[in-house]
Image (cartoon, rainbow, N blue to C red):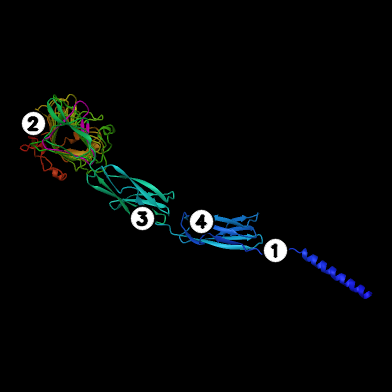
Amino acid sequence: MKKRTYALLTSMFMLVVLVSTNSCKKNENPPEPERPQPTITFDGDSTVMRLWGDEANIKATLDAQAGLKNLKVTKDGADFDNVDYPDGKVGDNYIVDEVIAETYLIGTEIAYVFTITDKLDRTATATFKITVGQPPAPEIAFTGSNSALIQAGDSVDISLSLDASAKAKDLIISTDGAVFETISFTNNETELTYVYKAPTDPALLVGETVVYSFELTDQLDRKTDPISYTIEIGTPAPTFEVKDTTINAVNYKLVRGDINIDTLFSTSNLFLLSGIVKVMPATTLTIEAGTTVYADTTGQTALAIQTEGKIMAEGTSANPIIFTSLSDAPTAGDWGGIHINGLAAVAAPNAPLVAVIGDYGGGNNADNSGTLKYIRVEYAGKSVGGSTGALNFNAVGDQTTIDYVQVFNPNARGIRFRGGKANLKHALISDPVSRAIVWESSWVGFGQFWVVAYEQEPPTAVTGIEGRDVGSNPTISNVTVLSLGGVAFNNTRAVRFRNGTHGKMYNAIITDTERGVRADNGSDTDINNGDLLFANSRVFDNTDDNYRNDGSLFDNPASPFFNTSTPVTLTGYVGFEATGALDPTTLDGWFSAAAYIGAVETGNDWTNGWIK
């Protein structure tokens, strides 16, 4: 019985243990599955080259199946960015788009290191490397044509396309193989269109060319090959007119405006100037021997040769060129006369005059404005721009030829030198109403064979030859100033030095005027030190006095003056005296051999045949 009870108990215990064991197995949790390691991948290669100005363009894909916890990015070992992921997302994309700065040297390697940590504190690391590369070489090109046809003195806009990945530094512009201009860029431009206004010299002739070359450098001092732009000088559109007109049954070629094309006045026509007629820079007006040019007297008429323009008026003793009034009853001052504007030195241009006849003056005393030879200028001297002068040399240079000139019956001033270094040989001023020859504003030229002949009594006191202004310093030889008829006209004065002028005058005959030679008071210092000299001359039979004011210092037969009052026999203005004369060729090679006193040698009358 006990055995059976024990067996039963044992069986029941085993059953309970078995049930209990099975019950425990049913309540046990299944194990967690294993999560993949986090990873970082890049879009494309992880080692690349970038140029200055490029974006880094790094695209990183982050994968963390256990959930992202943190991203840390360093750049060359320094912290660049740090991103936390509190929501534990399993993936993300991260982009680095910063620009590669030009402060990096070419070849520099930039390392970006990416490290992610997942929720299980596992990490993954990846590196992206950028090498700073050499930018492309700079490039330059024309956006349009590489040539143009324009007029001398005009400019042309040259449009250039500039491309410099390493930033533009300088645009170098050259002409004739020499650097003309350098334009620097300071705003880190990499691509731009630049328009350069290219000038041309007004003195260029039709058919001549100018070549501009352009080169571009970048901040790496790399230079493009030059590209060239060719400008050809073409025939300009005329800015003047020449038209037929008939006045009192006489046919003329009426000329009006600015002559900007080489023009010929021939003997086959009579020409009539109307208004201020200018000969423009790089333009030549040629006038044939024997041609007559009339001036309209109804308004303000003058012929004005501009700087770098030229007049070629070369007459002959048999066929002089005549500039005269159109009036049937001409009088002094009917028209404004001739102005020649040069580029020689001048103390100060006359602004109101410049406003009418054009600018003058510069620093080229060897400037060349052309030729005047065997010409007559009649009845001129009307005020132009508030200034008078029949024949005006405004800052004219010494390469201009002026020889055999008559100014007949001028008003106010016959010949006027305003600065410059013009040289005048064989000049006759007949019947001047006022001053015959005036120099001022630092004229430093030469003169030889000058005659001033009063043919009637002037209405007011006038001076034959008057020099003015500090800075003027001419040298003149062989001069005759007188009243014709052997009797001094009232109101006539021969020579006056004033306003501090310097200068030297030799071999002069001064006679039959009211007053002879005057140097204003205060000139004594210049006379005594030789800066102002009147010498080797005959001054006689002048009714009031032969010398006046400080001019009395010239009244001396001794050195350096050698002046006397011994008369010279004259027929009109023709006559000379060899005794006491200076050989002017010792002064300068420009002077002709004429070792005599007076302007016109007996037996050699250079005025014969062509004067009025």
All told, the count of numbered labels is 4
- Which residue shows up at 26% across the image and 30% down it? 385
Q: Nearer the viewer, mark 2 or mark 3?
A: 3
- What's the distance in space between the residues labelled 2 and 3, CA to CA? 76 Å
Q: Are marks 4 and 3 in contact (CB under 8 Å)?
A: no
Q: Earlier in the sequence, mark 1 or mark 3?
A: 1
Q: Earlier in the sequence, mark 4 or mark 3?
A: 4
Of the numbered discs 4 and 2, the one sitting upstream in the chain is 4
Dot 4 alpha-carbon crowd within 10 angstroms: few under 14, some 14 to 19, many 20 or more: some
Q: Which residues are magenta?
A: 276-303
- Mark identifier at residue 32: 1
Q: Amino acid at mark 4?
A: Asn
Q: What label does residue 317 carry, if any?
A: none
- Say which amino acid is labelled 2: Gly
Q: Amino acid at mark 3?
A: Thr
Q: In the rendered structure, does residue 298 fall within the stretch colored magenta? A: yes
User: For the residue carrying disc 1, how many other residues have a C-alpha within 10 Å: few (<14), some (14-19), or many (20+)?
Assistant: few
Q: Closer to the observer: label 1 or label 3?
A: 1
Q: Position of residue 353 (x, y in %)?
A: 26, 32
- Closer to the camera: disc 4 or disc 2? 4
**570 is within the stretch colored magenta:** no
